[in-house]
Image: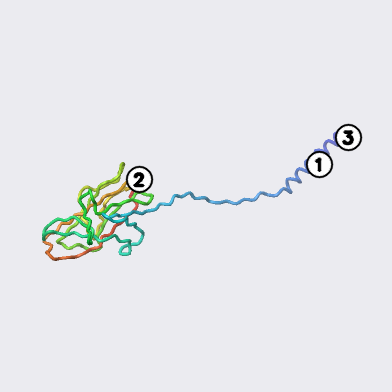
Amino acid sequence: MKNYKFFYGITGLTALMLLALVSAPVPNYAQTVMYFTNPETLSFTVTLPGYAANTSNTTVPPGAPATVAIEFNGTSATSNAEPCVRGGSATCQTGPTVPIFQYDNTGNANMTIQLKFSQALPSTLTICVNSTAQGTGNNALHHTGCFDLNDTVWAVVVQNLTPKGANLTNATLYANFTAYAVGTEGNRRLDHNGSRAVGS
């Protein structure tokens, strides 16, 4: 009789436990995919002597932000010239000491800065660009040779210009007049381009 009561007690307890398990609420779930991003921004400023920095944007020329105009004044039909800011109190380039353009990477990714004319130059005029680094630890790739500017190929001014610290690029332009008739005046638009540096 005692064994029967013991068996009955275990069986009743098991039944109660099973009943409790069957009536327990089933868990519910939801899920969320999480992305971790650090958005890349590209931006640069170009500064001309005696003027405030001009900030780039994504508008394609001719709608892009415009700097003040510059000019090359030859001394004869065949001569060389450095540019000056056009206007009454002109400020001129004096080699790399006072460059006509100074670039600063204001984004958060390494940049390549390039220049190109919107239209072909007269055959009697060529213009070239070179660049030097400014800032301690500036490891950007500058071009000490003078690269010709034209209307078909972007001329690279600097590669891998970092956005860190006061790392700047000084860009100088030089004009070569060859039988450019005295009294002649013409103009062209020069476009600046800043893009993500390849491999950065």
**In this image, 187 relative to 200: left or right?**
left
Write down the residue under mark 2.
Answer: 165
**In this image, 25 relative to 30: left or right?**
right
Determine the residue located farthest toward the front in the rendered image: 89
- The residue sitting at 12% across, 64% down in the picture is 182
Crowd around label 1: few <14 · some 14–19 · many ≥20 (10 Å): few
Q: Counting residues from the N terminus, which is met first, the one under dot 3 or under dot 1?
A: 3
Question: Mark 2 or mark 1, which is nearer to you?
Answer: 2
- The residue sitting at 57% across, 51% down in the picture is 31
Write down the residue under mark 3.
Answer: 1
Alpha carbon distance from label 2 to label 3: 92 Å
If the image is split into quadrants, where does the N terminus sit? top right
Alpha carbon distance from label 3 to label 1: 16 Å
Write down the residue under mark 1.
Answer: 12
- The residue sitting at 86% across, 37% down in the picture is 5
Determine the residue located farthest toward the top in the rendered image: 2
Crowd around label 3: few <14 · some 14–19 · many ≥20 (10 Å): few
The x, y position of residue 77, in whole percent, is 11, 61
The x, y position of residue 173, in whole percent, is 21, 54
Q: Counting residues from the N terminus, which is met first, the one under dot 2 or under dot 1?
A: 1
Occupied quadrant, residue 118? bottom left
The x, y position of residue 200, in whole percent, is 35, 47
